[in-house]
Image (cartoon, rainbow, N blue to C red):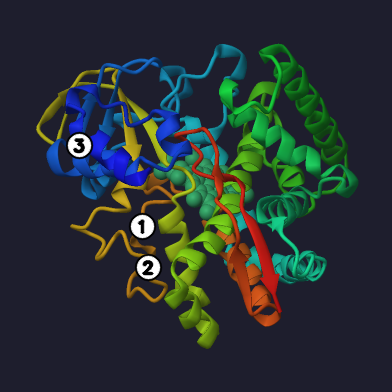
Amino acid sequence: MLRAARANAFATPLGEFHPGNPELFRSNTLWPYFERLRNEEPVHFCSTSPVGNYWSVTKYHDIMHVETNPEIYSSDMNLGGIQLRDLGPEFRWPSFIAMDEPKHGEQRKTVAPMFTPEALDMLASLIRERSADVLDNLPRDETFNWVDRVSIELTTQMLATLFDFPWQDRHKLTRWSDLVNALPKSMIYETEETRLTELRECAEYLARLWNERSKLKKRSDLISMMAHSDATRSMDRENLFGNLILLIIGGNDTTRNSMTGSVLALSENPDQYDKLRNNNVLVDTFVPEVIRWQTPLAHMRRTTTQDAELGGKLIRKGDRVVMWYVSGNRDGEVIENPDSFIIDRARPRIHLSFGFGVHRCLGMRLAELQLKIVWEEILKRFDSIEVVGEPERIYSSFVRGYSTLPVRVRT
Ligand code: HEM
């Protein structure tokens, strides 16, 4: 299948490339397309996509250029936002990931204290306790889906902790996050109407928590922090909802898919698994390598506020520009042996998976912490996690992830 995909990619004229086609991601056949783009046309215009024309930026340094010039390359939701696909107006809730300065910075500041090293130190023991509990309850010598039993469960628990969300309802967080990002063909909801109804319930639930917490003294969960901060206290309902949803989504699929990706990467690279097993301190460099290798968010999109030149191409004001992190992370001019999974790289954090510049991921330390703790606990308990079937990948060119990974753990 991969050989056929490669032949296909090399037989297709560049003018017909639509690298954002979700099917390439579901079938994991995207690689030769991006390889050709990096080598032959690093800034590429697609005019054959059903979701509208767009530019693809596929090389590391060009992506950095877009990231560091936000006044030219805007994230503003009203211009189109941060995903290749424009969202329908009913799904456009203002949140700071899709705003430009100065509003973006003002709102980001209100939740940033939740992610400082000191705040994360306080969370670490709780994350460890909960990770240990989930791992201790896994079936032994029996096949199960790692995505459901571990990745989803642990990220859901982490989110519930951050929000101090009612524990018995914590799975609602995952459901809402999945709904926001889902494409119609993803099959996780019946109609746009039912999807909207569920999301309205989500807005009401979050508004209720917000009201309760704003009446109490300030505490250290994200909802309370926002309810008591000057920049967010009197935010309109839509903006409030948008920011809360951003924090839910931000921490959900990304960490979940890194957790699944870590197991798959080690299974495909048994020499690296041996290295990690024999020297557990390598967890520190293994974690950022997993995040590069997985690239849980394949792209972010910007819209130009003026005519611009990039990679020798003239980009017109108002054009969509897609930064393909998934491709920049395989750019051999910056990352040595980019197609290999190497857990002891000298500079493992130069990858683009967290973006760069003013919008750089706010939760990156938390994501790394969660993965590090899970793996420290795995290494203490299991000789190996064996992948015993093919992974199923999700239908999206935004979230790069998995719905299924059949495994067995051996103790
Ligand atoms: C491996 C895990 C993660 C990855 C790969 C990831 C990736 C990203 C990326 C690519 C961006 C946009 C950067 C840009 O536009 O330059 C972003 C922004 C953001 N992420 Fe993450 N993320 C992860 C985990 C988390 C977690 C755990 C949280 C919080 C619970 C979080 C919260 C956010 C927020 C709030 C933003 C918006 C920042 C801003 O606009 O200023 N992320 N993330």
Q: Which residue is disc 1 drawn over?
A: 351
Inspect the image, locate mark 3, and give the three-letter code of the amino acid beneath it. Answer: Phe
Question: If you read the primary sequence from the N terminus, does the residue marked by circle 1 or circle 3 appear first?
Answer: 3
Cβ of mark 1 under 8 A from ligand 1: no
Camera-near label (3 vs 2) is 3
Q: Residues within 10 Å of mark 1 (few under 14, many from 20)?
A: many
Inspect the image, locate mark 1, and give the three-letter code of the amino acid beneath it. Answer: His
Task: Calculate the distance from the C-alpha at mark 1 to the C-alpha at mark 2.
Answer: 7 Å
Observer able to see residue 68 = no
Q: Quadrant of the N terminus?
A: top left
SS under mark 2: helix
Q: Which residue is disc 2 drawn over?
A: 348
Q: Residues within 10 Å of mark 3 (few under 14, many from 20)?
A: some
Question: Can you give x and y, in whole percent of width and height, for residue 298 in the image?
Answer: 42, 42
Task: Calculate the distance from the C-alpha at mark 1 to the C-alpha at mark 3.
Answer: 27 Å
SS under mark 1: loop
Asked if disc 1 and disc 2 are in contact, CB closer than 8 Å, the reply is yes
SS under mark 3: helix
Please state the total of marks drawn on the protein image. 3
Q: Is residue 226 left or right of residue 52?
A: right
Residue at the spot 29% in from the left edge and 53% down from the top edge: 330
Residue at the spot 15% in from the left edge and 35% down from the top edge: 41
Question: Can you give x and y, in whole percent of width and height, for residue 176 in the image?
Answer: 71, 33
- Where on the picture, by quarter, is residue 241? top right
Task: Name the residue nearer the viewer: 368 or 52.
Answer: 52
Q: Which residue is disc 3 drawn over?
A: 10
Observer able to see residue 299 = yes
